[in-house]
Image (cartoon, helix red, strand yellow):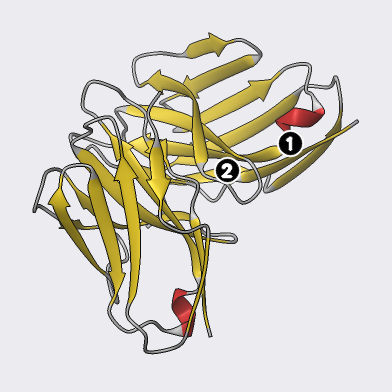
C-alpha cells in the first residue's frame, strides 16, 4: 500500500522560478525523506526531516512537515535545468527500517 | 562514498526463464532492499534483508525470491519470468547509523 502521494504528478517551470512539490501520507511517521531520480537512473537522497521538526533547509532545498495534516512540501528555489528529474517522498514508520515511497512528481525546468 | 552496483542496466528475457538480478554494495551495510518501479506506482518493496541469510517479504513478493549469502550481495530471483514482471528493478542498501538509503542505478528488465 502506498503511504505517500505526491502532488502534482507533473510540474513544468522556467529556469529561475521556484518549484513546490507536496506529499501527503496516511499514518504517523518517524521521518520523511525526499529523493531525486534522474531519467532512468537510481534514486539519490536529498533531505530528511524528522517527525519533531517543522522545517529544514539544505542549499536551495527547503522542506516543511506538518504532522497534524500528515503532509510535507519540498521547495526548490531558483531552479535550474539540471533540476529536471522525478522527485519522490518516502516515509519511515516505526522501527521497521523500511521506507514507503510515493508515486513521484516529474519536474521539468525549461531553460 | 557508498557504491551500490547492479549486474545489468538492461536485460531482456523470455517468459518462463529463470532470471537473476545481482546487487553489490561496498560499505558493509547490514540492510538491503529490492524494489520495482512502474509508471504511476512509484517504488514498491519486493523483499528486504537485515542480515546475511535473512530475508523478509515486502509489499509485492509474489513471483520473486531472494538470496543473501554474503553481507555485500543481495540477489533477486525470478523463478519463472512473466511479462507482468517487465519493470525497472532498483536495489538499495542502508545502515542503521545513517537515515538514507543508497540506490543502485537500476536494471530495466523486459520479459517477452
Above or below — where is B80 with respect to B77? Answer: below
Above or below — where is A58 with respect to B64? Answer: above
Q: Under tag 2, what secondary structure?
A: strand
- Residue drawn at 68 percent across, 39 percent down: A85
Q: Horizontally, is A15 left or right of A94 in the view?
A: right
Q: Position of residue A22 (x, y in %)?
A: 60, 34
Above or below — where is B110 with respect to A44? Answer: below
Q: Which mark identifies residue A21?
A: none
Residue A26 seen in this snapshot: no
What's the chain of the residue with tag 1? A
Task: Name the foreground residue: B77 vs A59.
Answer: B77
Task: Name the foreground residue: A83 vs B71.
Answer: B71
Residue that extends furthest to the left in the rendered view of this protein: B53
Residue B89 seen in this snapshot: yes
Q: Position of residue B75 (x, y in %)?
A: 27, 59
Badge 1 is on which residue? A84
What's the chain of the residue with tag 2? A
Badge 2 is on which residue? A6
Q: Hey, which quadrant is residue B69 in on the image?
A: bottom left
Amino acid at each position: 500500500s502506498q503511504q505517500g502521494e505526491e502532488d502534482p504528478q507533473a510540474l513544468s517551470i522556467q529556469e529561475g522560478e521556484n518549484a513546490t512539490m507536496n506529499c501527503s501520507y496516511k499514518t504517523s511517521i518517524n521521518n520523511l525523506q525526499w529523493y531525486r531520480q534522474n531519467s532512468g537512473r537510481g534514486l539519490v537522497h536529498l533531505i530528511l526531516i524528522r517527525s519533531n521538526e517543522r522545517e529544514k533547509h539544505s542549499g536551495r532545498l527547503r522542506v516543511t512537515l506538518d504532522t497534524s495534516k500528515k503532509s510535507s512540501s519540498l521547495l526548490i528555489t531558483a531552479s535550474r535545468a539540471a533540476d529536471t528529474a522525478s522527485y519522490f517522498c518516502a516515509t519511515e514508520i516505526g522501527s521497521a527500517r523500511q521506507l514507503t515511497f510515493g508515486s513521484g512528481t516529474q519536474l521539468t525546468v525549461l531553460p | 562514498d557508498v557504491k551500490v552496483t547492479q549486474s545489468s542496466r538492461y536485460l531482456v528475457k523470455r517468459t518462463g526463464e529463470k532470471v537473476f538480478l545481482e546487487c553489490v554494495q561496498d560499505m558493509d551495510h547490514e540492510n538491503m532492499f529490492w524494489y520495482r518501479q512502474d509508471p504511476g506506482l512509484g517504488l514498491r518493496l519486493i523483499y528486504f534483508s537485515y542480515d546475511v541469510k535473512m530475508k523478509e517479504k515486502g509489499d509485492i513478493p509474489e513471483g520473486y525470491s531472494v538470496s543473501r549469502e554474503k553481507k555485500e550481495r543481495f540477489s533477486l530471483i525470478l523463478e519463472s519470468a512473466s511479462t507482468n514482471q517487465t519493470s525497472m528493478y532498483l536495489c538499495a542498501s542502508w545502515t542503521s547509523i545513517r537515515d538514507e538509503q543508497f540506490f543502485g542505478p537500476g536494471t530495466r528488465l523486459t520479459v517477452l
